[in-house]
Amino acid sequence: MAHENITALAAELINMATADQQNSYRANDEAPAEQLAWRRLTARHGDRLNEIMEEYGWPTAELVGDDAARGAWLIAQHADRQLDIQRRALQLMEQAVATGSASPRELAFLRDRTLVNDGHKQVYGTQIAGIKDGSPVPWPCEQPEHMDKLRAEVGIEPFAEYTAKYTDKISTT
């Protein structure tokens, strides 16, 4: 029975992450109804992730598989209007990374996202505030001069490489 529950949980997390990815365009849509649909989706997913964390702790790859664990991270990452859930996910994910059960890279993204949402400076420069002169600009960072070193420590490419992906998308649209 427990195995069936975990299999169902993994499928649920993957399905939520897929729905998230398919609907993420709505987050910044010009139509308020589309933005509202995104907010409702991420709120439902955040609520469900909170229930999952209550029952299982952080859904690690060992528990639910790589794709489902990544899905849980994505759901936490997009729980921007549920900071209590995002902070809880961050805490549980920190514990999982400390035991080698979660990705330091994903933790870095979630840490930055949570810091920015809490009104603090980020550490790794993963969160983009906007575009200036055609180039992505990060939210303020605690130590911008050490950002690439810190990024490398958790497996994130240098900031210039990271933002080049966005610059390429901007220049082709």
Image: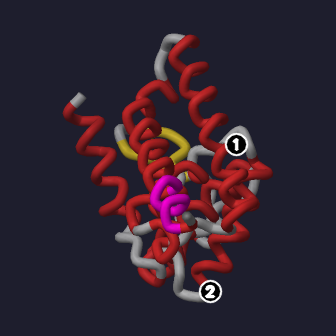
First reached walking from the N terminus: tag 2 or tag 1: 1
What main secondary structure does the magenta stretch of the protein show? helix
Q: Residue furthest left?
A: 172
- Where is 173 relative to 151, above or below? above
Residue 114: horizontal and vertical position, in percent? 68, 56
The residue that mark 1 highlights is 47
Q: What type is the residue that disc 1 sits on? A: Asp
CA neighbours of label 1 inside 10 A, class few (<14), some (14 to 19), many (20+): some
Pick whichever, 134 or 22, lies toward us: 22
At x 62%, y 86%, the residue is 98
The residue that mark 2 highlights is 98
Q: What type is the residue that disc 2 sits on? A: Ala
Q: Residue furthest right?
A: 84
Q: From where the camera sits, is residue 121 visible?
A: no
CA neighbours of label 2 inside 10 A, class few (<14), some (14 to 19), many (20+): few
Taking the magenta stretch, the answer to whether it contains residue 8 is yes
Pick whichever, 133 or 142, lies toward us: 142
What's the magenta region? 3-9
At x 60%, y 88%, the residue is 99
Residue 45: horizontal and vertical position, in percent? 60, 41
Taking the magenta stretch, the answer to whether it contains residue 13 is no
Q: Is residue 39 found left or right of 81 in the rendered image?
A: left
